[in-house]
Image (spheres, rainbow, N blue to C red):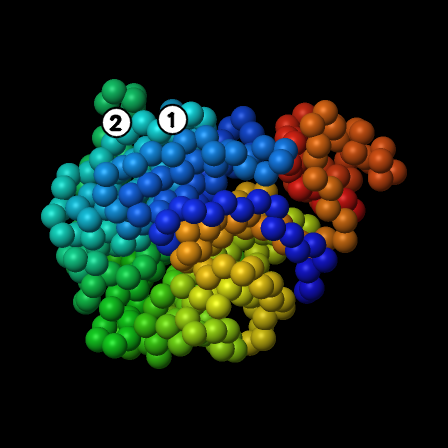
Amino acid sequence: MLLNTVKVIWQQGGLGAPVLVAWRKVADGRPDLVAAAAENVYLFIASPAGYNLGVAINVGEKVLSLATGLAFLTQDDNIALGFDDRVVIYGAGRSALSLLWETEREPGARFVDLALADIDGDGREEVVAASEGKEALYFYRLTGETAGEARLELLAIRVLPGPAEKVTVVKTTEGEVPYIVAAYRNGATSGLLTLSFTERGFVGGPFVEMLPAPVTSLTGGNLGRQPGGDFAWGGGDGVVRVMKINSQLATIITTDNLGSAIPALTAGKLPGDPQDTLIAGTPEGYLFGYQSPIERSAPDWAVWTGRPANSLDVSDEGMLGLGATDGFVQVWLLSPGKTIHIVRPGETLTSIAARYSITVAAIMEVNTIIEPGLIFPGRALLIP
């Protein structure tokens, strides 16, 4: 798979510290991009020209981790921040961030990574927080049925064999609860363990105590031929390993060396591609893409961004958000599709279809659009 569209559609510099990024779903428009750098959190709102700064706040202490989700009473995602001693959830308007909930303080915990997912199958997302200082995973659930009653309640703590490094949630087969995958430091390298939540509580799954390199990034995705149980980890040796969870942790692919390390890793669907693409970012400023099912060590494509990667995330509409270690944040349009149309103000699916002499139904099908009226300026549409 080669990319036919490679374009940085927006960037912002001057954030002054390594940047974490995550996309936030909103019910009435295109996803917002959330960025965190040091003590500052930014909300960038999609516009026809790129992204506009909607909110910038100083939260008073360094943000160690960032995730979005945990929608409650609305369809909009909330923003989760991991600090040294607690996890805090913010709700976001287009011009303000408001503190919704925070966990009890755990001094010295250092919540270095977060995952938000429905781990018990009850239809509501939980918070999985990786604690470096306490060498544990903390699990929190949202209780209450109204905004006034809602709070984050500690569900469980799972002690790890070493300081937590990364955590992700991996989908399994349909109807089965997902796996939680955690990486922890083990001397000069790392270990991996898996957990799942059952009616008996948390049950341990397959694990690896000594990996060939320290884990520097971790992500789940549909990466193999058989659905479910796939994840990938990037190492301090510049290599990505794609793994499958069965009765044991099996390595599907070990990639070529991609750089000095792999600090950023994500998986998602790019515009015009029905399959997930695994994307790795390096300190040397490169992005490497592997289209699923991943069956070879060499990447399908490489893009030079000019920015040393710190964090990556793919939005539901296929845009890639990149947070760099030098205080930059970028949004990239990467697509294997032959023709990409960026929706302009005033355009409709009818006018776009007429421009390319195709049907509205054809555009809706290839772009998975359910309601023809719900397109917004700035969205990238694949033209079949």
> Crowding at label 2, few (<14), some or many (≥20) Cα neighbours within 10 Å?
some
Q: Which mark is residue 367?
A: none
Q: Residue 54: image x %, image y %?
A: 46, 30
| Residue 181 horizontal/vertical position (percent) | 34, 60
Q: Nearer the viewer, residue 373 or 125?
A: 373
Q: Toward the viewer: 207 or 38?
A: 38
Q: Amino acid at mark 2?
A: Ala
At horizontal 36% and vertical 39% (from top left) the residue drawn is 41
Query: Where does label 2 land, which residue?
Result: 150
Mark 1 lies on residue: 96
Kind of residue at disc 1: Ala
Quadrant of the image containing the N terminus: bottom right
Residue at 25% across, 32% down: 101
Residue at the location (40% across, 57% down)?
325
Going by the image, does 334 lie left or right of 184? Answer: right
Q: Nearer the viewer, residue 330 or 105?
A: 330
Residue 216 seen in render: yes
Left or right: residue 378 compared with residue 305: right
- Please identify the residue farthest to the right as the structure is shown: 357
> Badge 1, how many Cα within 10 Å: few under 14, some, many 20+?
few
